[in-house]
Image (cartoon, rainbow, N blue to C red):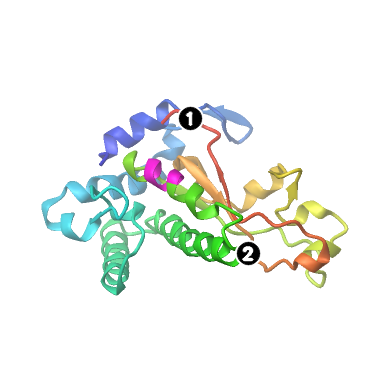
């Protein structure tokens, strides 16, 4: 498991593609410090004796001790621990801990990918692919940002009825279509290693929308 210093050192190795007020900045720029200090605390917490039990868990994939922010809940007690951890760290850090929505998102994808494969009678490998990604995610103690907000556009129209189709995340030739404006709805992406995109609104297949289960981007390797 990483420490705060190792986390920030990893950010320095990532692609330099952040902009602030029109200028490119480093990932450890002073404008980033409030966010990095909070996110960094989630990496230090498992190494603090009085927080270790609350902030760590055993991976169901490898059996190794991992940061609980990277964990897939295995029972109701895991859910209680995750909630207690979030509240404790938010009180200690005195602001949003940033990393909790990514944890919720990977747990949702874990369940959804399993159910999708079951519904497709084994013709897809969403869950297998997700578990392959998850093992790397846990082993490297990565932070993921959940990009869960579509632009929405014309609110009275469904996604497929939009005048501008880029108002909702969509699939074009099996690749997520790049929409720069989507970045306006991401928070803490600049402090994360990866981001996970999902639709906020249900999209109907009968409307001609091709759906993707998950898109996890890795635009900034290495970390």
Of callouts 1 and 2, the N-terminal one: 2
Q: Toward the viewer: 26 or 75?
A: 75
| Residue depicted at 46% across the width and 38% down the height | 31
Q: Which quadrant: the N terminus?
A: top left
Q: Percent position (x, y) of residue 69?
A: 34, 54
Compared to residue 165, the image places residue 29 above or below, namely above
Q: Is residue 71 left or right of residue 155?
A: left
- Most extreme residue toward the left is 49
Q: Could you say whether the residue bearing mark 1 is in a helix, strand or loop?
A: loop
How crowded is the residue under tag 2: few (<14 C-alpha within 10 Å), some, or many (20+)? some
Labels in figure, total? 2
Give the magenta range: 132-137
Give the residue at mark 1. Answer: 221
| Residue depicted at 41% across the width and 27% down the height | 12
Q: What's the CA distance linking mark 1 and mark 2?
A: 27 Å
Give the residue at mark 2. Answer: 200
Q: Is residue 181 left or right of residue 1?
A: right
Q: Percent position (x, y) of residue 170?
A: 73, 52
| Residue depicted at 41% across the width and 54% down the height | 98
Q: Which quadrant: the C terminus?
A: top left
């Amino acid at each position: 498991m990483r420490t705060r210093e190792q986390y920030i050192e990893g950010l320095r190795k990532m692609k330099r593609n952040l902009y602030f007020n029109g200028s490119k900045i480093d990932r450890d720029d002073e404008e980033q410090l409030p966010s990095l200090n909070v996110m960094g605390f989630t990496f230090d917490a498992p190494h603090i004796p009085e927080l270790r039990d609350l902030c760590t868990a055993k991976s169901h994939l490898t059996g190794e001790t991992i940061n609980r922010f990277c964990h897939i809940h295995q029972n109701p007690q895991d859910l209680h621990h995750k909630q207690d951890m979030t509240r404790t760290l938010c009180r200690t850090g005195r602001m949003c801990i940033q990393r909790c929505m990514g944890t919720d998102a990977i747990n949702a994808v874990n369940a959804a990918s399993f159910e999708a494969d079951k519904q497709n009678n084994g013709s897809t490998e969403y869950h297998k692919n997700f578990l392959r990604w998850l093992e790397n995610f846990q082993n490297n103690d990565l932070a993921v940002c959940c990009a869960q907000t579509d632009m929405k556009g014309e609110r009275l129209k469904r996604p497929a009825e939009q005048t501008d189709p880029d108002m909702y995340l969509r699939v074009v030739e099996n690749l997520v279509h790049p929409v720069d404006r989507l970045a306006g709805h991401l928070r803490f992406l600049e402090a994360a290693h990866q981001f996970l995109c999902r639709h906020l609104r249900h999209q109907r297949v009968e409307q001609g929308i091709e759906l993707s289960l998950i898109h996890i981007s890795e635009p900034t390797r290495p970390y």
